[in-house]
Amino acid sequence: MMKLMKFMAAVCMLSMISAGVFAQDETEITDDQLYRYAIMQEVINLMKKDISTEVNKVIKAQEGMTGQRYKELAVTKGDEAKLQAIEAKDWEIQFLKQIDDFKSTRIASIKTVNSELATKMVGDSGKTYKKIKNMLKSDAGLKSRYDSIAVSLSKAKVKAD
């Protein structure tokens, strides 16, 4: 988590420094907007990865639970009939619920961060974020620019680690 915080701080500093560097054009997505979007995506991806890491730690720490058994339980999505079919014990069902609650809380936090970053970092009350997100699906040129920026961020992250 500390690495995530250091990375976020470094990225925010870079973002502020670069704000005046990129060209501004109201009609199309600027490099600055795309850069900020890429930073935001990197932060969200790190937060998602952190959920997986934490869940794996909890699974390993739970006596009697294995990763394989957790997967068998998780695939049921809490369906009582399916849980009975795999002979889930009461403590396993409770454990599954605890993990689901943990993940739900973290996912809600990620959604909040995503929303805040979309409006405050990318700008325009989230309109630019939505525009970029949608255009990346269909605009090959924009996707190429984004991929280039994302690669440079990835390299910066590796150096920060």
Image (cartoon, rainbow, N blue to C red):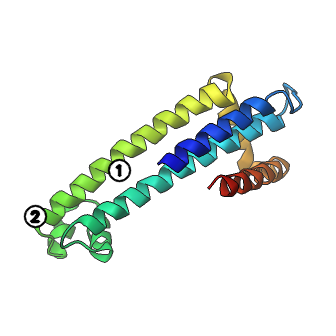
Numbered label attached to residue 114: none
As rendered, which of 8 and 69 lies closer to the eye?
A: 8
What secondary structure is marked by label 2?
helix
Occupied quadrant, residue 105: top left
The residue under the point 76% across, 34% down is: 33
The relative height of residue 32 versus residue 107 in the rendered view (above or below) is above
- Of pointers 2 and 1, the one earlier in the residue sequence: 2
Q: Does the image show residue 29?
A: no
Split into 4 quadrants, where in the image is the C terminus? bottom right
Q: Residues within 10 Å of mark 2 (few under 14, many from 20)?
A: few
Numbered label attached to residue 103: 1
Distance (Cα) linking label 2 and label 1: 20 Å
Horizontal side of residue 10 vs 77, given as left or right: right
As rendered, which of 37 and 74 lies closer to the eye?
A: 37
Question: Where is residue 56 drawn, in percent x and y?
Answer: 36, 64
Give the farthest residue toward the left: 90
Question: Where is residue 3 drawn, in percent x and y?
Answer: 54, 49
Q: Does the image show residue 39?
A: yes
Q: Which residue is mark 2?
A: 90
The residue under the point 29% across, 53% down is: 100
Question: Where is residue 10 drawn, in percent x and y?
Answer: 66, 40
